[in-house]
Image: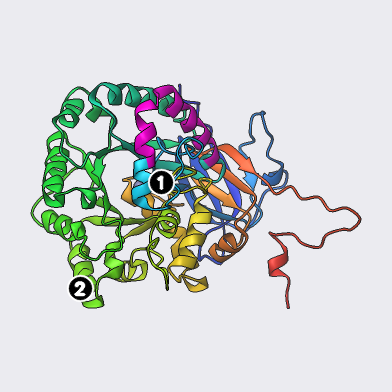
Amino acid sequence: MATPHVPLTLYRARLLNQPDLYRITMDQGKIHTVEPDPSCPPGVLDIQHAPIRETLPAALDVKGRLVIPGMVDAHMHLDKALTLPYAQNPSGTLEGAIQSFGQIRPRLTPEDVVRRFRLMAETVVAHGTTSIRSHLDFTTASTFLPLLQALAAVIDEWHDRLDVQLVVMAPRDNPPEFVDALAAGAARYLTAIGGAPHLASDPNTNLTWITSLAQKWGLGLDLHVDEQLNPAAKTLGWLAHWLTKNTVEHLPVIAGHVVSIGTMPPEEASALIQTVAEVPLGVVTCPATNLYLQGRHDTVNVRRGLTRIREWLAAGVPVAIASDNIQDPFNPFGRGDLLEMALLAGYAAHLGAAEADTLLAMITEIPGQLLGLSPYGVVPGSIADVVVLDAHSALEALQWQSPARWVFKRGRLVASRALVQHWYGMRPETDLFESPHAPL
Ligand SMILES: [Zn+2]
């Protein structure tokens, strides 16, 4: 049952790239107004003292902290997350990870997936993520529907804290039982159909099958695209060409990873980027898994495996940064913190201080729009999902990773975290929020 929404005002909020402070009002789960206002009425509670387990006041003073849209993780794998104890990957390759997870997949029960879902939901929300999209491996016709039903129940339970979209990964060999599962009711739980056609023995046949199923069932498309360094992987070109003549629900179509374009000759890559820029397609880059899984066979100058983020952005193609796998055979690390992923993308894709605002947009507004949450942002009319960070700017948020965060879902404070640091025998001078602005 939905929790009743009460109006809330945030005073002295700092917005990205704005010199002024703002007053933000939220009501009925939406952002109502965002207006310049440097003042704060007396008696308004400092957000650092927001009470736990008590009715929240109708106003909070964020004291000049940065307020960003709730983070949106556009590409996760909640059925795989936290399975590392059961499925290791000694080779560290994508193939090794797929094989390792394939061995435990038949043993996964809905109860186990739901248990790990709850753990992941808690950690992602506590870090400031308010919406996610998770891919799910297709299991069998008889086991997939019960899995979806169990997930739908727990997703409903989390509705006041986290929005979740589900995407099924269509198998690579076009089995009739996948079609049967969609017909048996699976389609109604899904936002999109995915898959990894570049790994199929016949990628074009697999793509034709997947796209036709998406059209038939009124679903979107969210594919793992060319997740390998071999420039011969060209399913992106097929998809872009298909989109010049066809369409699906939930546009844009999403292409995850898009690795092989990074190893194509610049002229070929540039032509492909121009083709993609003319169709409704967005890119989701997953820096953690690309860095971990790609380039394993390189012996010198090990490649990073990320897509051409700068070129995509320059061509006007939206690019989001996502977590992908967390503590499973595909990625032994990760904690569902998109600020950390933005930092990784900054390192891996040579995006620095000048692109800090862009990096932050790539974990907030851009994935929000890709997932159809428009309008999405700290703007009137948007869903009132916002995060208050212990920072004055995007750059500071990336530099210090904002240990303290306050997470609002549909206008309600749902989680916060803080830095707890004790010093013995001395009084520290550092304050992560105040010190960076001390004058030289
Ligand atoms: Zn993935």
Would residue 211 be counted in the magenta stretch?
no
Residue that numbered label 1 is attached to? 382
Magenta span covers which residues? 100-123
- Distance (Cα) linking label 2 and label 1: 39 Å
Element type at mark 1: loop
Residue 109, quarter of the rendered image: top left
Query: Mark 2 CB in 8 Å range of ligand 1?
Result: no
Quadrant of the drawing holding the C terminus: bottom right
Query: Mark 1 CB in 8 Å range of ligand 1?
Result: no
Residue 412, quarter of the rendered image: top right
Tell me which secondary structure the magenta stretch mostly adopts: helix
Quick check: 371 above or below 111?
below
Instruction: Looking at the picture, tell me which residue is in the foreground, 361 or 276.
Output: 276
Residue 375 visible in rendering: no
Identify the residue shown where x is 58% and y is 47%: 10
Quick check: 394 above or below 289?
below
User: In the rendering, at what x and y percent does residue 345 appear?
Assistant: 45, 62
Residue that numbered label 2 is attached to? 268
Residue 186, quarter of the rendered image: top left
